[in-house]
Image (cartoon, grey):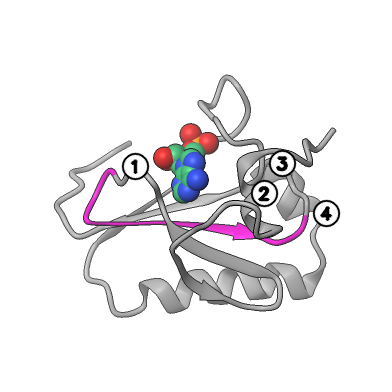
């Protein structure tokens, strides 16, 4: 069950400020409040999706395309970057609204 009062839902409703870097009809991108890299952006769908599995299974084609193109626009001029998505309690997800972390601006090493 989606928690309507999670912090990203509140950002989407304008109840909490965010440093927005890009907004489209279906997607919002804003700076992480506790950046782990010089460029640390969170990209979220505006729809109420909890995890990556939820979003990628249940979002409309328009939402999926808009999300992917927004990520692409933010990354296309960057040389090196890492994309992270934490999902579920066991996956370390703190905010239960699907989000993708975009990290760049410093060497990220090799994960995996
Ligand atoms: P996760 O652990 O993947 O759920 O990541 C949640 C992220 O949200 C963390 O990196 C937090 O620093 C970030 N965060 C929490 N509250 C805010 C906020 N109000 N504005 C921007 N980022 C936030």
User: Which quadrant of the structure image shows residue 68?
Assistant: bottom right
Q: Is residue 111 left or right of residue 9?
A: left
Q: Secondary structure at mark 2?
A: helix
Q: Between marks 4 and 2, how big is the CA–CA gap?
A: 22 Å
Q: Are marks 1 and 2 in contact (CB under 8 Å)?
A: no
Question: Which residue is label 1 attached to?
Answer: 34
Q: Nearer the viewer, mark 1 or mark 2?
A: 2
Q: Are marks 4 and 2 in contact (CB under 8 Å)?
A: no
Q: Secondary structure at mark 4?
A: helix
Q: Check if residue 106 falls in the magenta segment.
A: no
Q: Check if residue 39 falls in the magenta segment.
A: yes
Query: Residue 29: percent from the left, percent from the top?
Result: 51, 65
Question: Which residue is label 4 attached to?
Answer: 58
Numbered circle sitting on residue 51: none
Question: Which residue is label 3 attached to?
Answer: 50
Disc 4 crowd, CA 10 A, few/some/many (<14, 14-19, 20+): few
Q: Quadrant of the N terminus?
A: top right
Q: Between marks 1 and 2, how big is the CA–CA gap?
A: 18 Å
Q: Residue furthest left?
A: 107
Q: Nearer the viewer, mark 1 or mark 3?
A: 1
**Of the image marks 4 and 2, the number of the one nearer the N terminus:** 2
Q: Are marks 4 and 3 in contact (CB under 8 Å)?
A: no
**Of the image marks 1 and 2, the number of the one nearer the N terminus:** 2
Q: Nearer the viewer, mark 4 or mark 1?
A: 1
Q: Indicate whether 23 appears above or below 84.
A: below
Q: Between marks 1 and 3, how big is the CA–CA gap?
A: 21 Å
Numbered circle sitting on residue 10: 2
**Of the image marks 1 and 3, the number of the one nearer the N terminus:** 1
Q: Between marks 3 and 2, how big is the CA–CA gap?
A: 14 Å
Q: Nearer the viewer, mark 4 or mark 2?
A: 2
């Amino acid at each position: 069950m989606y928690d309507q009062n999670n912090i990203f839902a509140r950002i989407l409703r304008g109840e909490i400020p965010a440093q927005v870097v890009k907004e489209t009809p279906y997607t919002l991108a804003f700076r992480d409040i506790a950046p782990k890299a010089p460029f640390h952006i969170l990209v979220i769908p505006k729809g109420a999706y909890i995890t990556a599995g939820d979003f990628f299974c249940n979002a409309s084609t328009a939402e999926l395309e808009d999300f992917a193109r927004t990520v692409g626009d933010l990354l296309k001029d960057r040389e090196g970057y890492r994309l992270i998505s934490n999902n579920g309690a066991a996956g370390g997800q703190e905010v239960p609204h699907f989000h993708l972390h975009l990290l760049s601006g410093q060497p990220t090493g090799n994960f995996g």
